Amino acid sequence: MPAITTNDLKNGITLEIDSGLFTVVDFQHVKPGKGGAFVRTKLRNLRTGNILERTFNAGIRVEQAILDRADMQFLYKEGDDFVFMDTESYDQINISPRALGEASDYLVEGSKAIIAQYRDEIVSVEIAVTVELNIALTEPGIQGDRVSGARKPATLETGKVIQVPLFVNIGDRVKVDTRSGDYITRV
């Protein structure tokens, strides 16, 4: 594992600190009038998503963690696991829903994802910001019911329940924001 100094920090670098993986979100080199220089950082824990603020003395060594990122395609579910295929090597791996996190709510066969691994552990899954999915179940829309902003629950083909406008029906294709789970528009 390469060691770098705190002077080499950049946004997006992944560090192993206290046996945890952290990505540098923000950093600032500070040179006070008195005393030694230091680096103030904001770090995101890759496993929990929590933000940690930490200050390092300038020039100390930290361990950089090299993540293996691969473009993957979701093939099918096998039991509870999701089977992905590396689009370059065609190797297949099984990934648990826990490792996928909320991304599993938006995956249909053929979906693309960028999977980051560190020492055979999945540390992050990046999917598209918006996805188009079919409505599998919802109450039927009532003709003439056009209350502005009114919503009803609808189940997507993946099993995720979201709030949609009253005019959306079973079989409609909708665009959903994967960051918030919000309905965007009917496709």
Image (cartoon, rainbow, N blue to C red):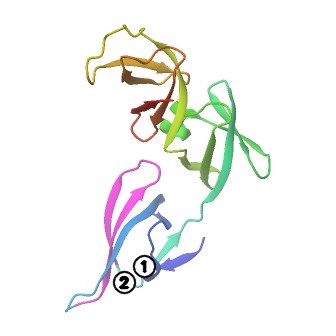
> Can residue 18 be seen by looking at this rendering?
no
* Residue pictured at 48% horizontal, 58% vertical: 21
Q: Secondary structure at mark 1?
A: helix
The residue carrying mark 2 is: 58
118 vs 96: above or below: below
Queried whether the magenta region covers residue 159, the answer comes back as: no
- Residue at left offset 26%, top offset 22%: 148
In the image: residue 6, left or right of residue 151: right
Q: Residue at x 62, y 26 (%)?
A: 80
Residue stretch rendered in magenta on the structure: 35-56
For residue 40, which quarter of the picture?
bottom left
- Label placed on residue 100: none
* Horizontal arrangement in the rendering, residue 110 relative to residue 131 (left or right): right
**What is the x, y in percent for residue 49?**
40, 50
Between residue 5 and residue 131, name the one nearer to us: 131
Q: Nearer the viewer, residue 49 or 161?
A: 161
Residue at image position (53%, 36%) is 131
Q: Tell me where residue 83 appears, x and y as whole percent.
A: 69, 35
Residue 35 vs 167, above or below: the answer is: below
Q: Which residue is mark 1?
A: 6
Q: Main secondary structure of the magenta part?
A: strand
The location of residue 127, given as percent across then percent down, is 55, 44
Q: Residues within 10 Å of mark 2 (few under 14, many from 20)?
A: some
The reply to whether dot 1 and dot 2 touch (C-beta < 8 Å) is yes
The amino acid type of the residue labelled 2 equals Ala
First-in-chain label (1 vs 2):
1
Q: Amino acid at mark 1?
A: Thr
- Pick the front one: 155 or 84: 155
Q: Secondary structure at mark 2?
A: loop
Q: Looking at the picture, how far across and down is residue 60, in whole percent?
A: 42, 81
Q: Quadrant of the N terminus?
A: bottom right
